[in-house]
Amino acid sequence: MAITKRHSLCIAAVGVVSAASVALAGTVASAAAPATAGASVAKATTAKTGITAQSSVTSVKAWRLFRVTGSATGLKPGSRVVLQQKQGKRWVSLPAVTPLKSKGTYSLGVMLGLKGRNDLRIVNGNTASPVFRVAVR
Protein backbone atom coordinates (compact mmCIF):
# COMPACT_ATOMS: atom_id res chain seq x y z
CA MET A 1 0.00 0.00 0.00
CA ALA A 2 2.86 2.38 0.65
CA ILE A 3 3.94 2.00 -2.99
CA THR A 4 0.49 3.01 -4.24
CA LYS A 5 0.36 6.14 -2.06
CA ARG A 6 3.86 7.14 -3.10
CA HIS A 7 3.01 6.50 -6.74
CA SER A 8 -0.13 8.66 -6.60
CA LEU A 9 1.75 11.43 -4.77
CA CYS A 10 4.43 11.36 -7.46
CA ILE A 11 1.83 11.60 -10.23
CA ALA A 12 0.10 14.49 -8.43
CA ALA A 13 3.41 16.33 -8.00
CA VAL A 14 4.30 15.86 -11.68
CA GLY A 15 0.87 17.19 -12.67
CA VAL A 16 1.25 20.32 -10.54
CA VAL A 17 4.77 20.98 -11.84
CA SER A 18 3.62 20.45 -15.45
CA ALA A 19 0.70 22.84 -15.06
CA ALA A 20 2.92 25.47 -13.47
CA SER A 21 5.53 25.21 -16.22
CA VAL A 22 2.88 25.47 -18.97
CA ALA A 23 1.44 28.58 -17.32
CA LEU A 24 4.91 30.06 -16.90
CA ALA A 25 5.83 29.29 -20.52
CA GLY A 26 2.65 31.02 -21.72
CA THR A 27 3.48 34.10 -19.64
CA VAL A 28 7.03 34.22 -20.96
CA ALA A 29 5.86 33.76 -24.56
CA SER A 30 3.31 36.58 -24.31
CA ALA A 31 5.84 38.88 -22.65
CA ALA A 32 8.41 38.13 -25.37
CA ALA A 33 6.02 38.95 -28.23
CA PRO A 34 6.91 42.21 -29.98
CA ALA A 35 4.62 45.19 -29.39
CA THR A 36 3.95 45.63 -33.11
CA ALA A 37 2.25 42.23 -33.32
CA GLY A 38 -0.32 43.30 -30.73
CA ALA A 39 -0.97 46.54 -32.58
CA SER A 40 -1.67 44.76 -35.87
CA VAL A 41 -4.08 42.39 -34.15
CA ALA A 42 -5.93 45.34 -32.63
CA LYS A 43 -6.25 46.95 -36.06
CA ALA A 44 -7.57 43.73 -37.58
CA THR A 45 -10.28 43.34 -34.96
CA THR A 46 -11.41 46.96 -35.15
CA ALA A 47 -11.84 46.89 -38.95
CA LYS A 48 -15.36 47.99 -39.85
CA THR A 49 -17.69 45.21 -40.87
CA GLY A 50 -21.06 45.66 -42.42
CA ILE A 51 -23.70 43.86 -44.44
CA THR A 52 -26.20 45.31 -46.89
CA ALA A 53 -29.39 43.54 -47.95
CA GLN A 54 -32.23 44.23 -50.31
CA SER A 55 -35.15 42.16 -51.47
CA SER A 56 -36.20 41.79 -55.09
CA VAL A 57 -39.83 42.33 -54.01
CA THR A 58 -41.75 44.22 -51.35
CA SER A 59 -44.78 41.93 -51.54
CA VAL A 60 -45.05 38.27 -52.58
CA LYS A 61 -47.53 35.38 -52.46
CA ALA A 62 -46.85 32.71 -49.85
CA TRP A 63 -44.23 30.14 -50.85
CA ARG A 64 -43.16 32.07 -53.97
CA LEU A 65 -39.45 32.42 -54.65
CA PHE A 66 -37.79 35.84 -54.42
CA ARG A 67 -34.17 36.97 -54.03
CA VAL A 68 -32.28 38.76 -51.30
CA THR A 69 -29.01 40.26 -52.53
CA GLY A 70 -26.32 42.38 -50.98
CA SER A 71 -22.69 42.70 -50.05
CA ALA A 72 -20.49 42.54 -46.99
CA THR A 73 -17.39 44.49 -46.00
CA GLY A 74 -14.81 43.30 -43.52
CA LEU A 75 -15.80 39.63 -43.90
CA LYS A 76 -13.74 37.00 -45.69
CA PRO A 77 -14.98 35.45 -48.95
CA GLY A 78 -16.61 32.13 -48.16
CA SER A 79 -18.02 33.39 -44.85
CA ARG A 80 -21.61 32.28 -44.46
CA VAL A 81 -24.49 34.73 -44.16
CA VAL A 82 -27.84 33.67 -42.73
CA LEU A 83 -31.35 35.07 -43.24
CA GLN A 84 -33.15 35.87 -39.99
CA GLN A 85 -36.84 36.61 -39.45
CA LYS A 86 -38.29 38.49 -36.50
CA GLN A 87 -40.85 36.29 -34.78
CA GLY A 88 -42.40 38.14 -31.86
CA LYS A 89 -39.48 39.72 -30.00
CA ARG A 90 -36.86 37.19 -31.17
CA TRP A 91 -34.74 36.92 -34.30
CA VAL A 92 -34.95 33.38 -35.67
CA SER A 93 -32.42 32.02 -38.17
CA LEU A 94 -34.11 30.50 -41.20
CA PRO A 95 -32.64 27.63 -43.22
CA ALA A 96 -31.44 30.09 -45.86
CA VAL A 97 -27.63 30.24 -45.81
CA THR A 98 -25.15 31.19 -48.52
CA PRO A 99 -21.40 31.88 -48.65
CA LEU A 100 -19.95 35.23 -49.67
CA LYS A 101 -18.45 35.34 -53.16
CA SER A 102 -14.89 36.55 -53.78
CA LYS A 103 -15.95 40.22 -53.97
CA GLY A 104 -18.05 39.99 -50.80
CA THR A 105 -21.43 39.74 -52.54
CA TYR A 106 -24.20 37.20 -52.08
CA SER A 107 -27.53 36.22 -53.61
CA LEU A 108 -30.03 34.12 -51.71
CA GLY A 109 -33.26 32.51 -52.94
CA VAL A 110 -36.01 32.75 -50.33
CA MET A 111 -39.56 31.42 -49.93
CA LEU A 112 -41.68 32.59 -46.99
CA GLY A 113 -44.96 31.12 -45.78
CA LEU A 114 -45.71 33.30 -42.75
CA LYS A 115 -48.40 35.66 -44.03
CA GLY A 116 -48.32 39.32 -43.11
CA ARG A 117 -45.42 41.74 -42.72
CA ASN A 118 -42.09 39.96 -42.28
CA ASP A 119 -39.12 41.82 -40.82
CA LEU A 120 -35.94 40.24 -42.18
CA ARG A 121 -32.18 40.76 -41.94
CA ILE A 122 -28.95 39.07 -43.03
CA VAL A 123 -26.49 38.08 -40.29
CA ASN A 124 -22.91 36.84 -39.93
CA GLY A 125 -21.92 36.40 -36.28
CA ASN A 126 -22.54 39.73 -34.54
CA THR A 127 -22.76 41.68 -37.80
CA ALA A 128 -26.29 42.27 -39.14
CA SER A 129 -27.77 44.16 -42.05
CA PRO A 130 -30.43 46.81 -41.59
CA VAL A 131 -33.94 45.36 -41.31
CA PHE A 132 -35.96 45.10 -44.53
CA ARG A 133 -39.62 44.13 -44.89
CA VAL A 134 -41.44 41.77 -47.21
CA ALA A 135 -45.21 41.41 -47.08
CA VAL A 136 -46.47 37.87 -47.69
CA ARG A 137 -50.06 37.55 -48.90
Image (cartoon, rainbow, N blue to C red):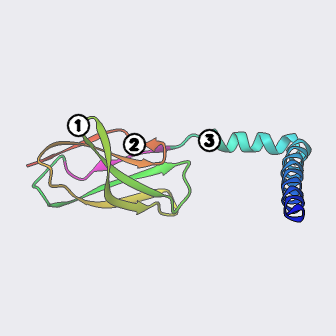
From the image, tell me which residue sits under label 1: 88
Question: Is 68 on the left-hand or right-hand side of 28?
Answer: left
Disc 1 marks a residue whose amino acid type is Gly
Using the numbered discs, state the Cα–Cα distance from disc 1 to disc 2 in whole angstroms.
19 Å
Q: Marks 2 and 3, how far apart in space?
A: 16 Å
| Mark 1 and mark 2 residues within 8 Å of each other at the beta carbon | no
Q: Which mark is residue 129?
A: 2
Tell me the element at label 1.
Answer: loop
Q: Give x and y (percent) for residue 120.
A: 28, 44
Residue 59 part of the magenta-drawn span? no
Give neighbour class at mark 2: few <14, some 14-19, many 20+ (Cα, 10 Å).
some
Q: Where 67 falls versus 31 (above or below)?
A: below
Marks 3, 1: nearer the viewer: 1
The image quadrant that residue 31 belongs to is top right
Give SS at disc 3: loop
Name which residue lies at 87% across and 43% down: 27
Cα–Cα gap, marks 3 and 1:
33 Å
* Badge count: 3
- Between disc 3 and disc 1, whose residue precedes? 3
Q: Which mark is residue 47?
A: 3
Residue at horizontal 32%, vertical 42%?
Answer: 91
Which residue is rendered at x = 20% and y = 51% of the image?
A: 57
Q: Residue at x 84, y 47 (%)?
A: 23
Please name the amino acid that badge 2 sits on: Ser
SS state under label 2: loop
Does residue 126 appear left or right of residue 118 in this picture? right
Q: Disc 2 or 3, which lies upstream in sequence? A: 3
Q: Pick whichever of labels 1 and 2 is earlier in the sequence.
A: 1
Q: Which residues are magenta?
A: 50-57
Please state, as top left, top right, bottom left or bottom right, where the N terminus lies in the image. bottom right
Residue 88 percent across, percent down from the top left: 23, 37
